[in-house]
Image (cartoon, rainbow, N blue to C red):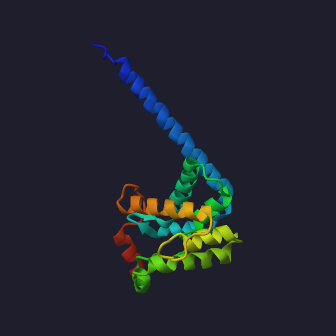
Amino acid sequence: MKKKYVSQSTRGRCEKDALRWQRQFIRRRDLHRKIKNAAGDILQSDNFRSTKKHVQHGDMTVNAHCLNVATYSLMLRDKLHIRCSEEELIRGALLHDYFLYDWHSKEHVSIKNLHGFYHPGIALKNASEEYELTPREKDIIKKHMWPLTVVPPACREAWIVTVADKWCSLMETFRIHKGHGAKRDDRENQAVS
């Protein structure tokens, strides 16, 4: 039996890749722990969990999208060394799309084309009814769709979430970030039933 020869450079490259993957895994795990610690009440709420039934972009659920935005908001803050309130950043990011309906469904066809303009206000109303929001969290939720919301964000946290939301939306729309959301046919069948 012949032994395969693996060059030192190939072995070194494999080890570097393994270390890079390990660092990325640890980083993601730490970010998810921060999110859980700052917003465990939101993550466990029935309304937030119900967002797993609604598709946001492509096949990404609203729930997964909000978690992605929270994660990328933390990553952006860390990468750019922006000082801000971590807890308010996370909570605002998780609640920024707290509109609690499937905007693709037939029953919401009247607002489908204007969803981008209206949903921040609806999300803020829903979140305010369920949680005690700080002024920064309100600003994040209300203005995350800037420039559609006309008035720009007033705090660093809102700017970070606005940028992270645009990035995640783009990646999800072009299916670079893939979700496990309901297929379009399933949602249409649910709307009819």
Quadrant that contains the C terminus: bottom left
Q: Position of residue 29 (x, y in %)?
A: 57, 45
**11 versus 90 height, above or below:** above
**Position of residue 48 measured from the top left corner of the image (x, y, whole percent):** 58, 68
Residue at image location 62% in from the left, 55% down from the top: 35
The answer to whether residue 37 is seen in the rendering is yes
Q: Residue at x 57, y 66 (%)?
A: 49
- Which image quarter holds the N terminus? top left
Q: Residue furthest left?
A: 2
Asked if residue 98 shows in the view, the reply is no
Q: Quadrant of residue 42?
A: bottom right
The residue drawn where x is 52% and y is 68% is 51
Residue 149 location (% of width, % of height): 51, 76
Given residues 193 and 148, the one toward you in this image is 148
In this view, the residue in front, 30 or 116, is 116
Out of 60 and 143, give the one closest to the viewer: 143
Is 66 situated left or right of 155 in this image? left
Q: Is residue 2 left or right of residue 66?
A: left
Instruction: Name the spot of residue 56 as percent of width and height, x first.
Output: 44, 68
Q: How many marks?
A: 0
Q: Is residue 41 above or below residue 120?
A: above
Q: Is residue 92 found left or right of 16 in the rendered image? A: right
